[in-house]
């Protein structure tokens, strides 16, 4: 792993390669502040993903690109194959469908596995997800708990 100074130098070089001006200021905008960039004259937008070693925070799943979701699925798959849990729960049906290219996936236990690991998809419990009420979420998460408990007994 590169020393932090080398990482900063590489990130700065990446930014310089995308803009040939000398900035007087840099502003890192988070969720909900993107409109501010439109108000700045002579500025440039550089996505987090275009800057090496720049951690990308995401408040909402819909902000992730297909590429990011699929890259995350590959990372998760490697970890599952390494640690071999009996179950994994993936939060968010839409993200699961995109990340694992399972367009017809439904909530609950999936027919596919990762190695010997069973995949269970649950809805995102975010308050932004109006499709499920708390009682519905409780039933779905209880079903996962029961499946994992019953699987442990066999």
Image: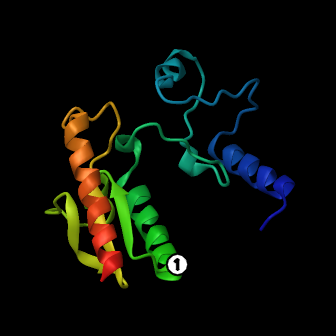
Which residue is disc 1 drawn over? 83
Q: Residue furthest top?
A: 39
Residue 17 position within the rendered picture, expressed as x and y whole percent measured from the top left: 67, 48
Of 6 and 59, nearer the camera is 59
Q: Is residue 34 left or right of residue 122?
A: right
Q: Is residue 111 above or below residue 28?
A: below
The quarter of the image holding the N terminus is: bottom right
* Vertical comparison of 93 with 100: above or below: above
Foreground of the two, 62 or 7: 62
Which quadrant: the C terminus? bottom left
Q: Is residue 99 visible?
A: yes
Q: Relative to the observer, which residue lies in front, 96 or 70?
A: 96
Q: Residue at x 68, y 44 (%)?
A: 15
The crowding category of the residue bearing disc 1, from other C-alpha atoms within 10 Å (few below 14, some 14 to 19, many at least 20), is few
Count the labels in the image. 1
Q: Residue furthest toward the left? A: 104
**Residue drawn at (70%, 28%), measured in percent from left and top?**
26
Q: Residue 103 location, x and y as percent?
A: 17, 62
User: Is the image coloured rainbow, by chain, by secondary structure, or in one colour?
Assistant: rainbow
Q: Residue at x 80, y 64 (%)?
A: 2
Decide if residue 93 is in sight here: no
Q: Quadrant of residue 41?
A: top right
Question: Is 47 placed left or right of 130 in the picture?
Answer: right
x then y, percent, for residue 93 = 25, 53
- 38 versus 124 height, above or below: above
């Amino acid at each position: 792993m590169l020393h932090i100074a080398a990482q900063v130098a590489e990130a700065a070089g990446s930014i310089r390669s995308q803009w040939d001006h000398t900035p007087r200021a840099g502003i890192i905008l988070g969720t909900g502040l993107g409109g501010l960039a439109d108000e700045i004259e002579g500025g440039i937008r550089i996505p987090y993903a275009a800057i090496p070693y720049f951690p990308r925070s995401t408040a909402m799943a819909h902000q992730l690109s297909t590429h990011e979701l699929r890259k995350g699925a590959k990372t998760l798959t490697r970890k599952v194959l390494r640690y071999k849990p009996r179950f994994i729960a993936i939060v968010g049906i839409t993200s699961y469908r995109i990340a694992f290219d399972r367009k017809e996936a439904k909530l609950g236990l999936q027919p596919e596995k990762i190695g010997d690991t069973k995949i269970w998809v649950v809805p995102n419990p975010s308050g932004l997800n109006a499709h499920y009420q708390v009682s519905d979420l409780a039933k779905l998460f209880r079903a996962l708990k029961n499946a994992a408990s019953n699987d442990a007994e066999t």
